[in-house]
Amino acid sequence: MGILKKRVNDFPTPYTCRRAVSEGDMATKLTMVLMGFGNMVHGQIVKGLLFLAVEVAYVVFMIVNGAGFLAMLPSLGSVEQKEVWDEAQQIYVYTGGDQSVLILLYGVATVILTGLMVCAWMCSLRSAYKAECLAREGRHVNSFREDLKSLLHENLHRLLMTPPMVFIGAFTILPLIFMICMAFTNYSKIDSHLMLFDWVGLDNFKALFDSSSILGSTFWSVLGWTLVWAFFATFSNYIFGMIISLMINRKGTRAKGFWRFCFVLSCAVPMFVSLLIMRTMLQPEGAVNVLLRNLGLIASDASLPFFTDPTWARVTVIVVNIWVGVPYTLLQLTGVLQNIPGELYEAAQVDGANAIQTFTKITLPYMLYVTTPYLIVTFTGNVNNFNVIYLLSGGDPVTDLSSTAGKTDLLVTWLYKLTVDKQYYNIGAVIGILTFIILAIGALFTYRNSKSYKEEGGF
Amino acid sequence: MAGKKMQSASRKRFINNTIVHVILAVLAVIWVFPIVWVILTSFRAEKGSYVSTFLPQSYTLDNYIRLFTDTTILNFPQMFMNTLFIAICSCILATFYVLAVSYCLSRLRFKLRKPYMNMAMILGLFPGFMSMIAVYFILKALGMTEGNLIKLALILVYSGGAGLSFQIAKGFFDTIPMAVDEAAILDGCTRWQIFTKITLPLSKPIVVYTVLTSFMSPWLDFIFAKVICRANSDQYTIAIGLWRMLEKEYIDSWYTCFAAGAVLISIPIAALFLYMQRYYVDGMSGAVKG
């Protein structure tokens, strides 16, 4: 089974960088040093000037700041912040030491900029070679105005994709790379490395995998619970939502719209509001316990330990998640369920199958077949389900005071606690990377094997 | 003989129907119960967070009035305006991004198309806010974590990842026949004109869906706002405000106000959602045929 498909180039072009270097004329070769030169020679003055401006801007940036940022990257700064007694003002003054976070951030940004610069360089080379070829063959070379016009037609994707790509680059990719880099440093409150930190290689990974330490044992138990949670949260919602949807949509049920409305109402309430409501209702003195006392089901001073007993808390979050998630599942599955061919059910009825048999032999296999991608997305979402756990239990109860995670903490909520509350940024980053690896492996295998992937062929 | 059999079959059906209706009724009560409870609590006259009776003893409107008049500690009207402003701005940006990216991936064929879709899938596997701390550092380095710039920061953050959530809109665009585009090109349309004059008007459900989801996300998000706002209480959004009302120092006096605020927020969201529901289902199945 090939995980990586063989790459096929669907967009062959004669204007490649390699051919530009080997077959281009003098002007094209000069473009390698002076970007945009080839374009200018062939009459594309504005385009050439733009390329040149990009090069000049990059060189100026590198001379003024960039080179310094890159030079600092290997050491991440060495000047410590110091307290100095200022005689004149009679106070302690902090001298500005190196801030490793900023050095790392600027360094990463510079590296990315350099990568973009290489792309621009290749672009200019290709563009120059193309202009040269067209001019040699006596064909029309686009003017700048025509280039701009092509942005609305052949090159519309450049116009439309660039702004979103810039945003994704700045607010998703750059932070991710930055965070991944942190996993290989000792940026943490431990030994007060908050201002100044160093590269430590794979030490953080070793610390996390070492199951004899507190961190290591916490990691394995949190990982175990995360997988258990994701499994139950996904499938309980899926099956429960399907059963309710079937009950509403079966022939004999009256007032279908009313029933659907009752369930959908709870997903119309913002999720964090309904989760906060559930949390307050399930407190020891909350509404549910009060109700049970008033009904005489439990003693008047007793309360059920919804979030104080580990097992209770784990069951509670799964049950509440059913309450929160089933309406969404209901919405999404209704359409799919209605698409199941009716003949299958009629045939089953003729053969004398009962309700449970039709469900397990027809409905479930059909749904699993159609909704595998949906299930994978939900499973991934549940592994990363921050809201439900954080707003409901906050990871409580914490039974082992020396560990940093509670009994219902998922990897993500633990990550949040480690970074925001404890400021162990490096360990948090390692957990993020490991979460990604686990999800990626799982998703890759299921995606590649699922029939809907093979037929869609979108990726 | 045959009549008896028919009778027993219809009787069985009747029993089955009754059982299903009873189960549905019980489940519906479970699902509606917390919502009813919070509405009742928002009208409760007794102060304090936890009371010994399930139903309120007396009713009042004071909780709603206090929410809008007592602005010294938690300024609810200001939070509301903050959220509204952020929601409108990020809605415009995000809608444009989502529709533009979806159109490109669905209709145009270019070299970076597949790499882009693979990248989106890979990025989707990272824990959403693993990068949150890093985003905060970046915004801080840009000086956008103080004063009114926080609003701009939140707008950028909410619309930043929009280009990655193209799946639903792309699936919808895919259902519009390619023949429509080809005919337009023969008539001399540019692709930009096809996008704005043909594809978008044909895709009203998904446009409405995209606008509403991106408008709603700032009202619903809690974590990003909390990390970026930190202690700047004048920049808080509704979600953080409601969360703070349940913190230990406020919960006793603000608990019923929390319920009132929750009801107030839920009404517009619920209205939008119920309105959007059919677009949601349509968007999933693709409504444009031929």
Image: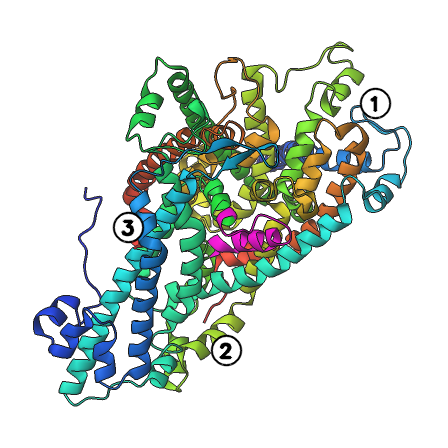
- Residue at label 1? B53
Q: Nearer the viewer, residue B202 or A214?
A: A214
Label 2 Cα crowd, 10 Å radius (few <14 / some 14-19 / many 20+): few
Q: How far apart are marks 2 and 3 (CA)?
A: 34 Å
- Where in the figure is residue A192, as x and y percent of width and height? 45, 26
- Residue at label 3? A454
In the rendered structure, which disc, 1 or 2, sits on the residue that comes first in sequence?
1
Q: Determine the residue positioned at 57% across, 51% down.
A: B154
- Where in the figure is residue B256, as x and y percent of width and height? 80, 34
Which residue extends farthest front? Answer: A88
Q: Which chain carries label 2?
A: B
The quadrant in which residue A101 appears is: top left
Secondary structure category for the residue under label 2: helix
- Name the front one of labels 1 and 3: 1
Q: Which chain carries label 3?
A: A
Quadrant holding the N terminus of chain A: top left
Q: Mark 1 lies on which chain?
A: B
